Amino acid sequence: MIMDQSLQNNFNALYEIARSINSILEPDELLVRVLEIAMKHLSAERGFVILADSNKDSGYDVVALKNFSSQQSTSEFAASSSVVKNVLNTGEAVLTFDALNDERFESSTSIIAQNILSIICIPLRTGERIFGVVYLDSNRMLKGFTEESLKFLTIFGNLAGIAIENATRYTALQKQNDRLKNEANVTHLFSNMIGNSQSWKNALEIAQRVLDIDIAVLITGESGTGKELVARAIHENGKRKGFPFVAVNCSAIPETLIESELFGYAKGSFTGAAAMKKGLVEVANGGTLFLDEIADLPFALQSKLMRLLQEKEFRRVGETVNRTADIRVIAATNKNLKDEIKNGKMRDDLYFRLNVVGIHLPPLRDRRDDIPLLANYFIQRTSQMYKRSIDGIHPDAMQMLLTNSWKGNVREFQNIIERAVVLCRGTQLMPNDLVFDFTKQATDLPPAMTLEEIERQIIQTTLNEMEGNRRRTAEKLGVSLRWLQYRLKEWNNE
């Protein structure tokens, strides 16, 4: 039996949409394809697909259209708006063989103006829910659409509805999967920064989003909250991984030296400049320059930093040649930079240039739920480092940790746990193992000492405790390694 040609054409078109169900999983692409198939099969000249949208004044959103000019879209859609709303509200398809003489459209001047002859519009459904329509029209064919066309398009619309629903669900699942992957990535990338509190997660999520984007980042937070750790994580997990990460503590370098430290200097540019020296900006080329305590950068130098940020250009001290540096700049501060601007200590344009993306690290007292996690992490790490057999912490000791004010934040917390692990005589940290002002006790300072002598003795005591390891000494004291090296050099301890 030979199949009727019209039936064959309908079958081929339905087969095509069925193939689309299995091959197209992007909703926008699928909607365009649905419209193309419908227009081709019914020889329509114009068409569009809309989806119901309660947020729109019209109640719907046009998501795919063909042969409607954007300049005339308002008047053109006016011709079909009543049709569309009727189909959306009733769920009944609309078919007219002769729109100009159809009494349902007598009041539509736009149909007359555009000479629309034939219209067909069917609902898109999922179950009993109507979520959109397919609209087609023609201004060339009188009786261009028939009852057979309506039957075909109705079946077509049901298949299309299933396809669109599947594609929408697939996209939603994909987004959910991406979100879960991002959360897993944050956990993995920042695994050495422990915390489950929402404020901490929010900070790390922002950091994760800017890993591969060379945009200026400003990290704010009190001393000891982990600003340099976050900056290093951004660098080491981003596209500049493998290139230098150069940290500069703007408060630790004397004002007279900081420009030459940052930008370098030419031979003979000042007394003592016996040879050319590259600055830290050049050392960081290809990588990341981390400017800690940016609020303490001398005001006179801030305009030169602005040029570096905007143009990637700088000059060595004593030179007139501009040099370029391919670097990413991450800045950090424990001060309120808006107050610094009001006090005339910081340029407002530099603040806005640095604060393109801001990451605020909450103080430990605002994330006390993280204290047990941090305690266990530092106990395990310190026990492995010093080969100690500490396997836990007594509840009373934990209560002391939970109620302490932690003015020094995570840095202070880490120091106290490390000391407790090293000096603990049992297998569990007890309350008497936690000394919250151990630096003062350890140094046993005599009266009438100068500030310099006190500073020197504290550094020397900590250096001995860390067995001469300067990096760990700097971390324990809460200062940069560069600052510590400056001090030791001054005291001829090199």
Image (cartoon, grey):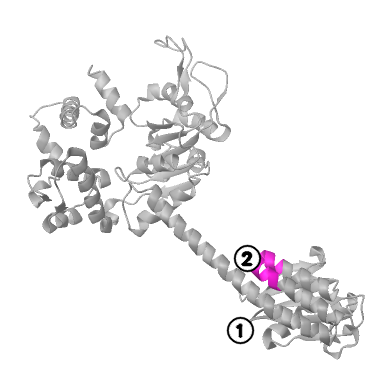
Is residue 204 shown to the viewer in this render? yes
Q: Which image quarter: residue 120?
A: bottom right
Taking the magenta stretch, the answer to whether it contains residue 26 is yes
Going from the N terminus, do you reach mark 1 or mark 2 first? 2
Tag 1 near tag 2, CB within 8 Å: no
Taking the magenta stretch, the answer to whether it contains residue 154 is no
Instruction: Classify residue 8 as left or right of residue 449.
Output: right
Q: Amino acid at mark 1?
A: Gly
Q: Disc 2 marks which residue? A: 25
Q: Which image quarter: residue 310?
A: top right
Q: Is residue 492 above or below residue 68?
A: above
Segment tinted magenta in the rendering: 18-32
SS label for mark 1: loop
Q: Is residue 335 above or below residue 132?
A: above
SS label for mark 2: loop
Tell me the quadrant of the picture where the C terminus can be found. Answer: top left
Neighbourhood count class around disc 2 (C-alpha, 10 Å): few under 14, some 14–19, many 20 upward? some
Q: Is residue 424 above or below residue 312?
A: below
Residue 127 bears which disc, if any? Answer: 1
Residue 286, position as x, y percentages in the image:
51, 31
Residue 190, position as x, y percentages in the image:
37, 48
Instruction: Classify residue 158 as left or right of residue 404.
Output: right
Dominant secondary structure of the residues highlighted in magenta in the image = helix
Q: Amino acid at mark 2?
A: Leu
